[in-house]
Image: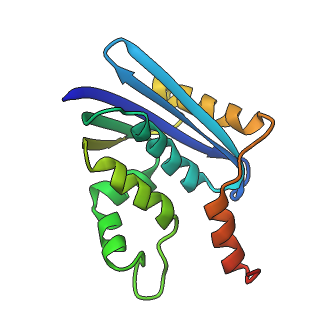
Amino acid sequence: MKKVYIYTDGACSGNPGPGGYGTILKYNQHIKELSEGYKLTTNNRMELLAVIKGLEALKEPCEVTIYSDSKYIVDAINQKWVYKWKNQGWMRNSKEKALNSDLWERLLQLMEPHKTQFLWVKGHSGHPENERCDFLATEAIKKPHLLDDEEFMKERSVEDGLF
């Protein structure tokens, strides 16, 4: 298996608010950067999407080390919380819904063919790839023609009683 490193970060201007993600993939001397911005979303959704987009870019099963400054993601995977939420019908406990289940589902599916390891890095601490991902994410927010985070909007409409 090829050994790939994925560095990720998500950003939001307001939470919820306009958001973006930045992802860097490294394989040997090859480097690929990905980023996109969204009109209205949350920071956690952008953190998840950064990892998802990185895994979606892989064309074959790989040994993947994923670096994220999101304790939400790293702990949910490493502590196996996300598997518990899924097994409980995307509930964190008997009363509390697990947020972002659409993205967690995508992430779990994308992880299947790969051997993945999730490592936490402290954000804004000078880690070169994390700083670059943060830059990509925040710059993505500034671009014209931001995308719609349709699942977030659907979930928000239901919670707000709009539909």
Q: Position of residue 140 (x, y in %)?
A: 68, 35
In the rendered view, tell whether residue 19 sits above or below residue 134.
below
Which x, y percent locates residue 35? 59, 33
Q: Answer left or right for 21 relative to 127.
A: right
Residue located 30% across and 75% down the image: 87
User: Please, is residue 93 above or below residue 152 in the view?
Assistant: below
Q: Residue at x 23, y 26 (%)?
A: 2
Where on the picture, by quarter, is residue 122? top left
* Residue situated furthest top in the rendering: 29
Please state which of residues 54 and 123 is positioned toward the viewer in this rendering.
Answer: 54
In the orientation shown, which residue stands out farthest toward the left?
A: 1
Give how far across and how far down residue 16 sits, in percent: 70, 59
| Residue most extreme to the right | 144
Q: Work out which residue is located at the far bottom of the displayed protein and give it.
A: 94
In the rendered structure, the answer to whether residue 43 lies left or right of residue 17 reads left
Q: Quadrant of the C terminus?
A: bottom right
Q: What is the count of numbered marks?
A: 0
Q: Is residue 53 left or right of residue 16?
A: left
Residue 36 visible? The answer is yes
Q: Is residue 24 above or below residue 159?
A: above
Do we see residue 69 in this rendering?
no
Question: Where is residue 9 drawn, in percent x and y?
Answer: 52, 39
In this image, 39 relative to 112: left or right? right
- In which quadrant of the rendered image does the N terminus lie? top left
Measuring 62% from the left and 44% from the top, which residue is drawn there?
11
Residue 21 lies in quadrant: top right
Colour pattern of the rendering = rainbow
